[in-house]
């Protein structure tokens, strides 16, 4: 049956993630800011994306670089102020783009006034806005945390507060205390935060660690993970059965959606909610909710990041993911973020080009991370430049995230045009040649390929909203059809660096290699779109 329903912008569109500290500095302090982003909007618009998601811009002590929020309704002075924000929003809208903020509901900073009040005494009215518990004494009367929960950054998830003689819960850093969503006043205050930004004209939110926001009643111990080995993070020692993915979190997620839907129902006017969800397929799909009680529009799907770069593996994963979607669920894909290693560092630049073609031709909304359009690869971070708290909590595991957060290299001028001062993190070592300006004028660059893919995606409904059908393919090759109406496209992706004999047919629209495709072969590292 043909579908006549008009697809909303967030189904047709492509999202671009900006990490504000590292996009463009405008005031010479080595840290990016809102005015800098505004100055570089042409780059974003000319790529051909539809929406920008900004990682947190709120006042923050920056212990976790903005994911520790000290005021949900303000702007961090390093980044600017509310007036600068309003200017940026207007400039984004003037270019026909959408703007999404990062909502961080699971925890605040320990310097948020709410927490300062909460920790001031046991009978403070905001005490219950956070999760406080008495110690669990052992047989010798020694003090222990209330349960065995482990922070996602390592170590106990409980911090002792000497002054009031209780522990508080923190799923991340001790300076990121978890908020108590079971408290109706806290919940109301956080819904007010969403209203504050929606009223200002936001087009939606990416919601940080959404699956964490409610914990099981009684806070029972989490079961041990029998598969844990010491090379894995401490978090993985336990299965987060009671600390995450609770029914009450789904109910709140449905309330977020109700609120968002009140702000826009037209296809081009809907306010989109993207939930950060790390869960296996069967639990992941539940975050779409039901047609009667929808939850987030797009529960982030990180499986291209999590799975081995192997055609057979990816084909199975894509099929399983598609099969897990509820009828009203729209797919989405991600290959990079401020948390994950750079795709070009992981699989090399030649395959990163194939990955870009995959990301932008799969069925579903893609999110593109800043810098991946330049194929920034591994950036060595000298020990004295390491900033990421995740590294410092478990230094032997090599899980520091700084290497994906390095500044955007704009041109070959000092500090790559990012700043007039030394940037807060080092630049990619090849910045004098790998930068936006250089790639703009290079027909063979990753940026040129990304633009061509985005342009094709915009032209061809088969790519943006069409159906998808996985194809049988030779070993090492991932292949699928995309079709809409009369148009049917075929995508062949060689996930290896050897030529693979292949009798492809059709009119080539784009090859990741730039040059003319050759009959009878899918060349090493070649991705091909055929009409
Ligand atoms: O990330 C949540 C999350 O799951 C991370 O712990 C992720 O597993 C890890 O960083 C991978 O290396 C979100 C934000 O994206 C992250 O930047 C924050 O540090 C975290 O929440 C706490 O707010």
Image: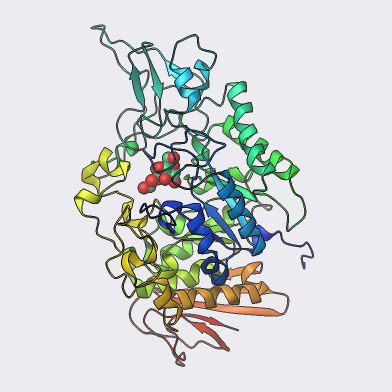
Compared with 182, 429 (above or below) is below
What x and y, as percent, mark residue 234? 29, 37
Give the position of the N terminus as an image quadrant: bottom right
Tell me if residue 490 can be seen. Answer: yes
316, 363: nearer the viewer: 363
Give the position of the C terminus as an image quadrant: bottom right
- Colour approach in the figure: rainbow
Q: Most extreme residue toward the right, as rendered?
A: 4
Picture quadrant where residue 120 is located: top left
Q: Is residue 400 left or right of residue 48?
A: left
Compared with 123, 448 (above or below) is below
Residue at the location (53% across, 39% down)?
Answer: 210
What x and y, as percent, mark residue 241? 45, 32
What x and y, as percent, mark residue 445? 41, 78
Residue at the location (33% across, 18% down)?
Answer: 160
Residue at the location (61% across, 68% down)?
Answer: 468
Tell me if residue 474 can be seen. Answer: no
Q: In this view, does 11 lie to the left or right of 70?
A: right
Picture quadrant where residue 431 is located: bottom left
What x and y, as percent, mark residue 52? 56, 57
Q: In this view, does 168 lie to the left or right of 295?
A: left
54, 378: nearer the viewer: 54
Residue at the location (21% across, 54% down)?
Answer: 382
473, 46: nearer the viewer: 46
Compared with 421, 358 (above or below) is below
Numbered marks: total: 0
Quadrant assignment for ligand 1: top left
């Amino acid at each position: 049956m043909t579908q006549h329903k008009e697809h909303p912008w967030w189904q047709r569109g492509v999202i671009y993630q900006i990490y504000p500290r590292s996009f463009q500095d405008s005031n010479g302090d080595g840290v990016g800011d809102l005015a800098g982003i505004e100055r570089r909007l042409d780059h974003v618009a000319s790529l051909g994306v539809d929406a920008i998601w900004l990682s947190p811009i709120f006042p923050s002590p920056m212990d976790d670089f903005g994911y520790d929020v000290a005021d949900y309704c303000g702007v961090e002075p390093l980044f600017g102020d509310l007036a600068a924000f309003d200017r940026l929003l207007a400039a984004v809208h003037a270019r026909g783009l959408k703007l999404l903020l990062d909502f961080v509901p699971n925890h605040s900073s320990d310097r948020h006034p709410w927490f300062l009040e909460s920790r001031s005494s046991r009978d403070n009215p905001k005490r219950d806005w956070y999760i406080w518990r008495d110690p669990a004494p052992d047989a010798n009367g020694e003090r222990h945390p209330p349960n065995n929960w482990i922070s996602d950054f390592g170590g106990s998830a409980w911090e002792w507060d000497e002054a009031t003689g209780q522990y508080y819960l923190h799923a991340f850093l001790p300076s990121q205390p978890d908020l108590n969503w079971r408290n109706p006043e806290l919940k109301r205050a956080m819904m007010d935060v969403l209203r504050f930004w929606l009223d200002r004209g936001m087009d939606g939110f990416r919601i940080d660690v959404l699956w964490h926001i409610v914990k099981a009643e009684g806070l029972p111990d989490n079961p041990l993970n029998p598969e844990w080995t010491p090379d894995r993070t401490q978090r993985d020692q336990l299965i987060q059965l009671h600390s995450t993915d609770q029914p009450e979190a789904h109910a709140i997620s449905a309330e977020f959606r109700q609120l968002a839907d009140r702000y826009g129902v037209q296809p081009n006017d809907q306010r989109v909610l993207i939930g950060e969800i790390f869960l296996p397929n069967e639990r992941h799909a539940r975050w779409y909710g039901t047609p009667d009680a929808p939850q987030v529009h797009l529960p982030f799907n990180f499986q291209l990041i999590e799975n081995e770069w192997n055609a057979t593996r990816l084909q199975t994963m894509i099929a399983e993911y598609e099969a897990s979607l509820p009828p009203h669920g729209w797919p989405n894909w991600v290959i990079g973020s401020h948390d994950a290693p750079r795709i070009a560092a992981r699989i090399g630049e030649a395959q990163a080009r194939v990955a870009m073609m995959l990301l932008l031709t799969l069925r579903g909304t893609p999110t593109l991370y800043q810098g991946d359009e330049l194929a920034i690869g591994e950036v060595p971070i000298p020990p004295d430049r390491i900033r990421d708290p995740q590294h410092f909590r478990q230094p032997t595991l090599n899980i520091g995230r700084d290497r994906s957060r390095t500044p955007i290299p704009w041109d070959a001028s000092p500090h790559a045009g990012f700043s007039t001062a030394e940037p807060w993190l080092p630049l990619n070592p090849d910045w004098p040649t790998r930068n936006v300006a250089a790639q703009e004028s290079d027909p063979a660059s990753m940026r040129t390929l990304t633009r061509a893919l985005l342009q094709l995606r915009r032209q061809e409904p088969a790519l943006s909203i069409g159906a998808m059908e996985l194809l049988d393919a030779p070993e090492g090759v991932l292949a699928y059809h995309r079709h809409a109406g009369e148009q049917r496209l075929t995508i062949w992706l060689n996930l290896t660096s050897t030529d693979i004999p292949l009798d492809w047919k059709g009119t080539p629209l784009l090859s990741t290699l730039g040059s003319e495709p050759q009959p009878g072969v899918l060349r090493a590292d070649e991705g091909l779109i055929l009409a």
